[in-house]
Image: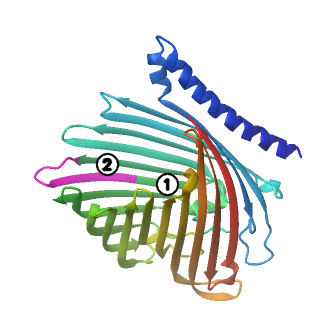
Amino acid sequence: MKKWKIYLFLLGMSFLLGSMGVQAEVSFAKAPGKDKMKETLHWFHPRLDFSTQYDDNIFLEPANEQDGFIFTTSPGLSIFVPFDGDRHLFSLDYQVDFLNFSEFGSQDFVAQSVRGTLDFNFPKFYVINSDMFRRTSLRSDTEFTERVDRNENTYNFAIGTKDWNRFSFETGYNLFFTFYDDDSLDSIDRYEHVVRATGYYRLFTKTKALLEYSHGFLIYPDDTNNRDGDYDQISAGLTGELFTRMVGTAKAGYQNRDYDNGQDLSNLVVDLSVTEYFSPETSLTVAYTRTAIESVFVTNDFYFTDYVSATLDQKLFWNLNGVLGFSYQTNDYDETVTVDSVTGARNDDLYGVKAGVTYPFREWLTTGVEYNYYDRSSNFDDFDYNDNRVMWKVSAKY
């Protein structure tokens, strides 16, 4: 009963903080001599999200599923500071997620994330810096069968030129690393460095052709099985307005992956994400990705994935916004392994369906409900599961 009181209090605070934000804006707007303070306050955007989710298979088990409610409270703060006549931008965002399980208190945990950008926009070129740090234990989009505490960080740098005789150029550097709290997982701590170069040619006013090359370095500092490696990838495609009312990027190419222990790969890669705007009320986003991903499953260095999704966004009556989505993914592993008397090269098929609606009570306050269904079918039966989730969410922001 005490836990319910806490969540009711936090929900009430979300409404209160949102109201205070609107009242503060009105009072500063009316007060003489407060323009500078009002402008400064508009750099800061606090928010508070609260959600209640019912999950009928919390541990994603193939049998003997256990259900329960998950309550998530997520305060956050965004800071946007444009400077030099709004040509350049510094931004910072921090969020903390408090997750509480109604039936399994041992699963309660706290996740944190910090994002920062520093972008420069000069007359003939631009510079982009971004970094995101996550402290998490979520198993979503991982191969883990239980939560694993870890730190993850992604840094991106790019410098590019503006159009010159239809041509432009961009080069960049990306760094990803992940470190696990459990010392027994030191062997899969990982750095991934990527350097890349992209050339663009403007075919039409809003459409560019591109040619891209990237080289990646894979480093496992505590691994003793020669897992380090590198890869080369070259891609070509289009970006911008691909057709009337359709925008996005479509590119395809070839990747060669070379590991010190001999687990090599050469295969076609694809990266496509396009949105068709049928009307101001209706849009459809389609995505397809084909690539190799680093693996933590037994002795596999990687798995190859094909992922396709479609999401329909629709403005409905009474100011409601609806979303309907579907996804399918297949993961193919290269190494033959044995798990619980099953021997073979693992293959997984994953399906996902989502449907939801959101309603904005005010500019600063929205609520919504969403249903998600997930299914994984594997030739290793221990990794099969299906999962239904229903979530209600309230978001207040200033």
Q: Is residue 256 above or below residue 79?
A: below
Q: Looking at the magenta stretch, what is its main secondary structure?
A: strand
At horizontal 70% and vertical 88% (from top left) the residue drawn is 341
Q: In the rendered structure, which disc, 1 or 2, sits on the residue that comes first in sequence?
A: 2
Q: Categorize mark 2 by other alpha carbons within 10 Å: few (<14), some (14-19), many (20+).
A: some
Q: Amino acid at mark 1?
A: Phe
**Number of numbered discs visible in the structure rendering:** 2
Which region of the structure is painted magenta? Answer: 161-174
Q: Residue furthest top?
A: 33
At horizontal 69% and vertical 71% (from top left) the residue drawn is 387
Q: Residue furthest front?
A: 317
- The residue pinned by badge 2 equals 158
- The residue pinned by badge 1 equals 177
Q: Nearer the viewer, residue 6 or 223?
A: 6
Real-space Cα separation, disc 1 to disc 2, in angstroms: 18 Å
Badge 2 marks a residue whose secondary structure is: strand
Q: Is residue 88 above or below residue 325?
A: above
- Left or right: 207 as drawn, with respect to 158: left
User: Which of the 4 quarters of the picture holds residue 349?
Assistant: bottom right
Q: Categorize mark 1 by other alpha carbons within 10 Å: few (<14), some (14-19), many (20+).
A: some
Q: Position of residue 4 (x, y in %)?
A: 83, 46
Q: Nearer the viewer, residue 2 or 242?
A: 242
Quadrant (top left, top right, bottom left, bottom right) of the C terminus? top right
Q: Position of residue 210 (x, y in %)?
A: 23, 63
- Left or right: 54 as drawn, with respect to 91: right
Asked whether residue 369 is in view, the answer is: yes
Q: Is residue 371 above or below residue 48?
A: below
Badge 1 marks a residue whose secondary structure is: strand
Q: Position of residue 348 (x, y in %)?
A: 57, 80
Q: Nearer the viewer, residue 258 or 342?
A: 342
